[in-house]
C-alpha cells in the first residue's frame, strides 16, 4: 500500500457497493477514505475531519448531492466537490455550474477515471492554495471562464446523452429501435450514410435491416457517382465486395468499436470513405448486429467523442430491445390468458361458442373495408376477442337462461361492458381497447348502454364492433331462440342504419355481404369449430 499520500477523501452515495469499491480502491492508492450514505452523514464527517476532496452522488435520500455541494462551499469553498450521477440532465449540469463543483462524472464511472479526476482537482487545489496571494483578478477571471466553458461543454454533452436515452425509452416496439438508431446517428454525428447490419451465430453473413439510404439493399454502398469503386476501394471487381463483410466479421469477433478518423488508404474501407465508425450491439452478452457510420462528402471527421456517443447509444438500444422483447412477450402471454377466460366463458354456453372469434374476424374485415390502419386493425381484433369478457361477472342462472329475461335480469346483463372494460383497464395496457369494449352496445341514436353515447361520441371502432356483434348474435343459435334467416338479419341491419348502427359502417358491411365475404368469415369459423369438436 502506498503511504505517501495523506489526502482525506470523502465518498457520499446511497449505494453501498459503490462506497465499498471506492473505499478499497483509494485505500490501496494510499488515501485516507471516509464514506457517508447521504448528505447529512457527510456533514457530520466534515465537522470532525479536514476533507481534501468530496465525491458525491446527486440523487440520495435526505440531503441530495447538489445541496451537499452548497453546504460544503459554505464550510470551506476550497474543498473540491466532484458530482456523480447515473441520470444526466441539462438541469443538473447547470445546477452544478451554479454551485461551482470541480467535475461532473456520469455513472457507471471507472475507478481509474475517478482517480484521474481526483488528481486534477487536488493539483488545482494545491496550486490555488500556494498562489492564492499572488493571483490577480484577471487570472482568476480567466480560470473561471475556462471552468465555465468546460462545464458548459459537459452540459452540451449531457444534453446529447439525455436525448439518446429519452428517444430510445419512448419507443414502444422493438422493430422501431433500429430506424431510431439510424435517425439519431445521422443527427448527432452528421454522417453521410448510416447502416445497421444484423450479424449473429444464426446469421453468418451480415445484412442490412435499417439504413439512411432508402435504396440500400446489400453490402454494396458508398460508391462514387462516376466510378465503379466498390467497398474494397478497387475498380470493377465484384468479387472484392467481401472486404466490408470481412471487416464487420472482424469487429464482431473482437467485440470492440472501430474508429477510422482519417482514412489514409489503409485498405480497411473504400478509399472514397473519408471517415468511418462501427459499433457492435450485444444483446444478453452476444453480438446481434453492428452499426456503421461513414463520411464520404462533408469536410468533417469523426472523433473519439463521436464514437463514445454511438457506443452509449448502442448500449441503451440493447437495453431497450431487451425490455421491449420482455414486454411484448408479457403482452402476448397476458392476451392469451385473458382470451382463455373468454373461451372458458363460452364453454359454459354451447350456443355462444366461437362468438368472440367470429365477431373479431368480422369486425376486422369491416375495418379493412373502411381502410383502417394496421394499428386500428390490431386494436379491433383484440377488442373483438375480449368484448364479452365482462360476462364472467354474470351469474349462470341469468347468462344461460333459456326463457325471456326479466327487466331486472336484463339490467344485470347490461353490466357486462362495464365489467369487461374494468377488467381490461386494470392491466394498464389497452386503454383504447378498453373504450371499445365499454361502448360496443352503445347505439348511434344515443339509446344504447352503458353511457348513452351517440354518433361520433361512440369510438369509431366500437361502432364497427357493434355491427359485427349484432350480426353474429342474430345469425347464431342462442339458448332462448334459434338463429334467424340470413335475409331477415340483413334487413334488420339495413333498417337500423342511423338508429342502432353507424350508416357508414352498415354500408361497408353490406358491400362485404354482397361479395359473400361476411358469410365466408362465418363459415370458416364454424368449420374450424366443427373440426375442433370432432364433428
Image: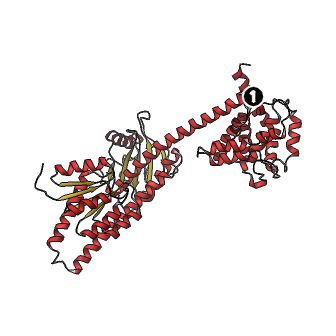
Residue placed at 21% from the left, 57% from the top?
9
Rendering coords of residue 153 (x, y %)? 34, 66
Question: Can residue 274 be seen by looking at this rendering?
Answer: no
Q: Residue 56, image x and y in percent?
A: 30, 58
Query: Which residue carries the number 1 mark?
Result: 349
Residue 270 versus residue 472 in the image, above or below: below
Residue 77 occupies which quadrant of the picture?
bottom left
- Whether residue 194 is visible here, answered yes or no, is yes
Q: Position of residue 75 (x, y in %)?
A: 25, 69
428 or 217, which is in the foreground?
A: 428
> Which quadrant, please, contains the C terminus?
top right
Secondary element under disc 1, as helix, strand or loop, is loop
Figure quadrant of residue 440: top right
Q: Residue at x 67, y 40 (%)?
A: 381
Closest to the observer: 40 or 6? 40
Q: Is residue 401 above or below residue 534?
A: below
Residue sitting at 81 percent across and 46 percent down? 506
Could you classify mark 1 by the number of other residues whose Cα lies within 10 Å: few (under 14), some (14-19), or many (20 or more)? some
Q: Nearer the viewer, residue 384 or 425?
A: 425
In the drawing, does residue 261 fall left or right of residue 177? left
Amino acid at each position: 500500500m502506498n503511504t505517501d499520500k495523506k489526502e482525506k477523501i470523502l465518498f457520499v452515495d446511497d449505494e453501498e457497493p459503490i462506497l465499498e469499491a471506492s473505499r478499497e480502491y483509494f485505500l490501496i492508492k494510499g488515501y485516507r477514505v471516509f464514506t457517508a450514505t447521504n448528505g447529512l452523514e457527510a456533514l457530520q464527517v466534515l465537522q470532525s475531519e479536514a476533507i481534501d476532496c468530496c465525491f458525491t452522488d446527486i440523487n440520495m435520500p435526505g440531503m441530495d448531492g447538489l445541496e451537499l455541494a452548497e453546504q460544503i462551499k459554505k464550510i470551506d469553498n476550497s474543498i473540491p466537490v466532484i458530482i456523480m450521477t447515473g441520470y444526466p440532465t441539462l438541469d443538473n449540469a447547470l445546477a452544478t455550474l451554479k454551485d461551482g463543483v470541480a467535475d461532473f462524472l456520469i455513472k457507471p464511472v471507472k475507478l481509474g477515471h475517478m482517480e484521474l479526476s481526483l488528481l486534477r482537482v487536488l493539483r488545482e487545489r494545491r496550486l490555488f492554495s500556494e498562489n492564492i496571494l499572488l493571483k490577480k483578478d484577471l487570472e482568476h477571471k480567466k480560470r473561471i471562464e475556462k471552468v465555465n466553458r468546460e462545464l458548459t461543454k459537459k452540459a452540451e454533452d449531457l444534453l446529447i446523452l439525455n436525448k439518446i436515452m429519452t428517444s430510445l425509452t419512448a419507443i414502444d416496439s422493438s422493430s422501431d429501435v433500429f430506424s431510431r438508431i439510424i435517425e439519431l446517428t445521422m443527427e448527432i454525428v452528421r454522417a453521410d450514410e448510416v447502416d445497421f447490419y444484423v450479424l449473429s451465430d444464426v446469421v453468418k453473413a451480415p445484412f442490412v435491416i435499417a439504413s439512411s439510404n432508402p435504396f440500400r439493399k446489400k453490402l454494396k454502398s458508398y460508391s462514387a457517382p462516376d466510378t465503379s469503386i466498390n467497398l474494397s476501394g478497387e475498380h470493377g471487381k465484384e468479387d472484392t465486395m467481401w472486404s466490408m463483410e470481412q471487416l464487420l466479421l472482424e469487429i464482431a469477433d473482437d467485440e470492440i468499436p472501430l474508429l477510422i478518423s482519417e482514412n489514409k488508404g489503409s485498405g480497411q474501407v473504400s478509399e472514397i470513405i473519408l471517415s468511418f465508425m462501427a459499433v457492435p450491439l450485444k444483446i444478453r452478452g452476444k453480438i446481434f448486429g453492428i452499426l456503421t457510420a461513414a463520411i464520404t462528402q462533408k469536410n468533417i471527421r469523426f472523433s473519439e467523442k463521436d464514437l463514445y456517443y454511438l457506443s452509449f447509444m448502442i448500449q441503451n438500444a440493447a437495453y431497450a430491445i431487451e425490455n421491449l422483447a420482455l414486454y411484448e412477450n408479457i403482452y402476448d402471454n397476458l392476451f392469451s390468458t385473458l382470451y382463455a377466460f373468454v373461451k372458458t366463458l363460452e364453454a359454459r354456453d354451447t350456443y355462444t361458442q366461437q362468438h368472440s372469434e367470429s365477431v373479431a374476424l368480422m369486425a376486422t374485415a369491416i375495418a379493412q373495408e373502411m381502410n383502417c390502419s394496421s394499428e386500428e386493425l390490431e386494436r379491433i381484433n383484440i377488442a373483438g376477442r375480449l368484448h364479452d369478457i365482462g360476462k364472467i361477472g354474470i351469474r349462470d342462472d341469468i347468462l344461460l337462461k333459456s326463457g325471456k329475461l326479466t327487466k331486472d335480469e336484463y339490467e344485470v346483463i347490461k353490466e357486462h361492458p362495464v365489467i369487461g372494460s374494468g377488467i381490461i383497464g386494470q392491466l394498464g395496457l389497452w386503454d383504447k381497447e378498453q373504450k371499445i369494449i365499454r361502448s360496443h352496445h352503445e347505439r348511434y341514436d344515443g339509446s344504447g348502454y352503458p353511457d348513452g353515447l351517440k354518433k361520433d361520441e361512440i369510438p369509431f371502432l366500437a361502432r364497427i364492433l357493434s355491427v359485427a356483434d349484432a350480426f353474429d348474435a342474430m345469425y347464431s343459435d342462442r339458448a332462448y331462440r334459434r338463429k334467424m334467416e340470413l335475409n331477415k338479419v340483413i334487413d334488420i341491419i339495413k333498417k337500423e342504419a342511423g338508429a342502432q348502427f353507424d350508416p357508414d359502417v352498415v354500408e361497408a358491411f353490406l358491400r362485404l355481404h354482397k361479395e359473400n365475404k361476411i358469410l365466408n368469415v362465418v363459415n370458416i369459423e364454424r368449420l374450424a369449430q366443427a373440426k375442433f369438436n370432432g364433428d
